[in-house]
Amino acid sequence: MKREIVWPDGRQSAAMLSVMLDAEFIWLSMDHEKYNTPKHRSMGEYGAKRGVDRILRLLKEYRVRATFFTPGVFAETYPQVLQQVIEAGHEIALHGYCHENFTAMPPDRQREILYKGTAILEKMTGRRPAGFRLPEGGCTEETLALICEAGFLYDNSFFDHDIPYMVELEGKQTGVVEIPIRWELIDFPYLAWGDSFPAGNDRVAIYDDVLDNWNRELEASYDGGYCYVLSVTPQTIGSPGRMFMLRTMLEQMTRKNIWLATGEQIARYVRTLE
């Protein structure tokens, strides 16, 4: 089968591991009145206190660099934790300021969040973040143009392809690379549970079933020569009984002829293909 994209160094396919440093802010963004209590906030705080350390140790063991999508408020609230990630050599990308839902925001407010979050991460890391990922809410018709305007190298928010591509707006190239994602490769919808999440109060998924989904998608992506993006959250994947899931996927990805890269590395390579 003819490949839609040729990956570097003769690799069969590509993969990206993204870690979302949402902490308690994902819960507060869903329902601030309900989740702004010590008990509810502690669900997200677990990721910063325990989950990040476990993920960093595992990534070091497998010699894998990941992309950590970071809300600006996380950097302000947990600077020591973010510093650990930086010192370990991982990419720091932007994930909003306070895990906002862009759907409900006018363009000026969205622009303000992009620039505010960028300034915070630049101050802490010493460089502008190359990538951006929308928090798990939606967006408006103007959002993609605002992401391009803000000067990001790539975006990691949309679902419309199996391989990265150059973003066009109104028939013109923007210079921004889109690295598409998939809901079924995000751990949070499977493994998180709160008073009003998920809708209908479905229970936490069976771990082996989730792992089977992830493995099947990896096999199909590998066969097709696509770009596999696995997205994990320290508060969900980072518990002692769940880390085997991430270990299993890293074992699979590092054994195969897969280019396992950061979002920035993938985007810079895709730009060379133009």
Image (spheres, rainbow, N blue to C red):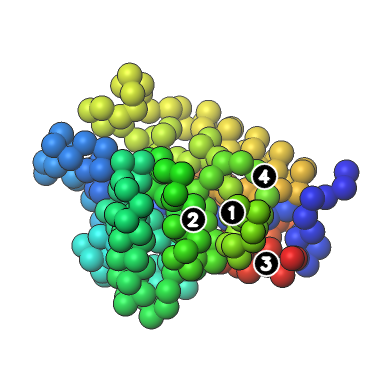
Using the image as rendered, state which of residue 210 and residue 152 is in the foreground. 152
Q: Are marks 2 and 3 in contact (CB under 8 Å)?
A: no
Residue under the point 36% across and 21% down: 202
Residue 182 visible: yes
Q: Residue tagged by mark 3?
A: 271
Spot the residue most to the bottom.
126
The kind of residue tagged 3 is Arg
Q: Secondary structure at mark 2?
A: helix
Between discs 2 and 3, the one toward the N terminus: 2
Q: Which residue bears the numbered disc 2?
A: 145
For the point 53% across and 28% down, the residue is 209
Give the Cα distance between marks 3 and 1. 16 Å
Whole-number angstrom distance, CA of label 1 to CA of label 2: 7 Å
| Residue type of the residue flagged with mark 1 | Leu
Residue at 25% x, 49% y: name it: 25
Mark 2 neighbour class, 10 Å CA radius: few under 14, some 14 to 19, many 20 or more: some
Residue 128 sits above or below residue 196 on the image: below
Can you tell which of label 2 and label 4 is closer to the viewer?
2
Q: Which mark is residue 169?
A: 1
Q: Residues within 10 Å of mark 1 (few under 14, many from 20)?
A: few
User: Residue flagged by tag 4: what amino acid is it?
Assistant: Asp
Report x, y in % for residue 186: 48, 41
| Mark 3 or mark 1: whose residue is earlier in sequence | 1
